[in-house]
Image (cartoon, rainbow, N blue to C red):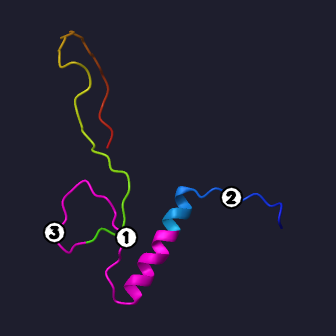
Amino acid sequence: MADAQQRVWKSADFALWRTVHMVHDLLNSRVPEYRVETFFPLVPGEVALAGGPIGCEAFRTAGDGSYVHSSGFVFGTGGLFR
């Protein structure tokens, strides 16, 4: 296939390639050479083997915090069901 166009490597290809190297190192009782960047410090000798996107969830009140009192009247009749 001399005329076949070479496919461009994508992030999934690089992830698989790195995984193969990490598993090979671990099976041979070696610390993996590849390092994953982290947003937090690692202890000397500690190795991060995986990484991914992170998100911080924040639960806040809806609105701007102002309160408007509106009066209402409710009237009902009837018995309670058991």
Quarter-of-image position of residue 58 = top left
Residue 7's tag is 2
Outermost residue on the bottom side: it is 28
Q: Give the percent coordinates (x, y) of residue 62.
A: 26, 25
Left or right of 33, for residue 13: right
Which residue: 25% across, 53% down?
Answer: 39
Measure how far apart labels 1 and 3 are at the Cα level. Answer: 16 Å
Q: Position of residue 22 (x, y in %)?
A: 41, 76
Report x, y in % for residue 44.
Answer: 16, 71
* Residue at figure coordinates x 20%, y 9% from the top left: 71
- How many C-alpha atoms fall within 10 Å of the one at disc 3: few (<14), some, or many (≥20)? few
Q: Secondary structure at mark 3?
A: loop
Q: Quadrant of residue 23?
A: bottom left
Q: Amino acid at mark 3?
A: Val
Up-down: is 54 above or below 50? above
Which one is earlier in the sequence, the residue at label 1 or at label 3? 1
**Residue labelled with disc 1:** 34
Magenta segment boundaries in residue numbering: 17-46
In front: mark 1 or mark 3?
1
Element at badge 2? loop
Q: Earlier in the sequence, mark 3 or mark 2?
A: 2
Q: Amino acid at mark 2?
A: Arg
User: The N terminus lies in which quarter of the figure?
Assistant: bottom right
- How many C-alpha atoms fall within 10 Å of the one at disc 2: few (<14), some, or many (≥20)? few
Residue 69: percent from the left, percent from the top? 18, 11
Dot label at residue 43: 3
- Pointer 1 with pointer 3, Cβ within 8 A: no
The image quadrant of residue 70 is top left
Residue 32 is a magenta residue: yes
Of mark 2 and mark 1, the one earlier in the sequence is: 2
**Camera-side residue: 14 or 80?**
14
In the rendered view, tell whether residue 79 sits above or below residue 43: above
